[in-house]
Every structure is written in C-alpha cells, then in structure tokens.
Image: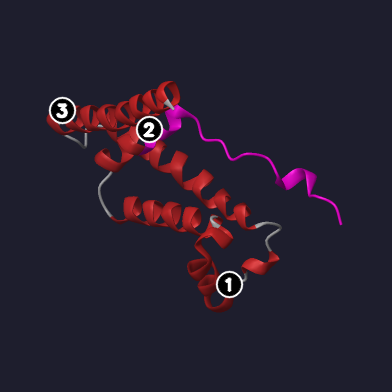
Amino acid sequence: MGGQRYTAGPVYIGAVVIFLFVLGLFAVRGHIKWWLVSATILSILLAWGINFEFFSNLFIDYFLDIINLRTVSMVLVIAEFCIPLLGILGLWKMFSDELKPEIKLKALRNATAIVGGFALISLLCQVYF
C-alpha cells in the first residue's frame, strides 16, 4: 500500500482567523463560546494520535468510532470549523451594540497582545534558533 495523496496536506488557519478567534474568546459570552473552545481543544488533542496515545486510545475504544476516519488528523476539520465560527461570532459582537465600548476595547487590546506576543516569540525563535 502506498501513501494517501489527498490526506497528507497541511492544516492551515490564517493569522487573521486566529486573531479573530482570540478576539471571540474575549467578546463572546455564554455557553456557545465554551462549546466551540472545547470542541477545538478536543479535536487538536485527538489529532495528536500516537503522540498522545492514552487519550487517543480512550476515544478510539470507548467514545468515538474514529477508526472510520482516513487518518487521525482528519479530526482537525472540527477545529477548522470552530475557530472561524468563534471568530465570526466575536466580530459580530464587536460590531453590535450588545457590548459596552470599554469591553470592546479591552477585548481588542487583549487579543492584540496575545496574538502579537505569540508572533513576536515565533519571530524571535526563528531568528535565534
């Protein structure tokens, strides 16, 4: 058997979508945010497969019928859906009148600091290592 040509591609979510996701973490309130964050984290943990074998085997044996997926990383489709969805909800909250201007400014400041900080750390690691 050879490699699977169509399942070996990288999972890509852009920097703007990640920024909007983090903005949504601060702007969106309620249970919808926590469902989306939980599904995102769960899908990332399941995608680690053999690198997080205890967790993967637990879900393979008892919770999900993951064996029907082509590869373990196919579960990242859940994250690829939840991350932009929370970003869109966050953007919608920022343009609606539901939030006070102080909360909008704080959410924007926090999201910029977090994403900018990770970008700076990534840049420094790339330059020095």
Is 117 in front, or is 110? 117
Of all residues shown, which one is farthest toward the top? 127
- Residue 60 in magenta? no
- Of the 4 image quadrants, the one containing the C terminus is top left
Q: Secondary structure at mark 2?
A: helix
Marked residue nearer the N-terminal end (1 or 3): 1
Between marks 2 and 3, how big is the CA–CA gap?
18 Å
Helix, strand or loop at mark 3: helix
What's the distance in space between the residues labelled 2 and 1, CA to CA? 32 Å
| Snapshot quadrant of residue 100 | top left
**Where's residue 57, x and y in %?**
55, 72
* Amino acid type shown at disc 2: Leu
Give the Cα distance between marks 1 and 3.
46 Å
Q: Is residue 126 left or right of residue 4?
A: left
Give the vertical position of 128 relative to 30 (above or below).
Answer: above
On the picture, is 30 further left or further right than 64? left
> Which percent across, then down, holds residue 123?
40, 23
Q: What residue is at 51 percent from the left and 74 percent from the top?
A: 58
Residue type highlighted by circle 1: Ile
- Which sits earlier in the primary sequence, circle 2 or circle 3? 2
Residue under label 3, please give it.
Answer: 101
Q: Are marks 2 and 3 in contact (CB under 8 Å)?
A: no
Would you name the residue on which mark 2 appears? 20
Residue at image location 21% in from the left, 27% down from the top = 109
> Residue 9: percent from the left, percent from the top?
68, 40
Q: Which residue is mark 1?
A: 60
**In front: label 2 or label 1:** 1
> Which region of the structure is painted magenta?
1-21
Callout 3 amino acid? Pro
**First in sequence: mark 2 vs mark 1:** 2
How packed is label 1: few (under 14 Cα within 10 Å), some, or many (20 or more)?
some
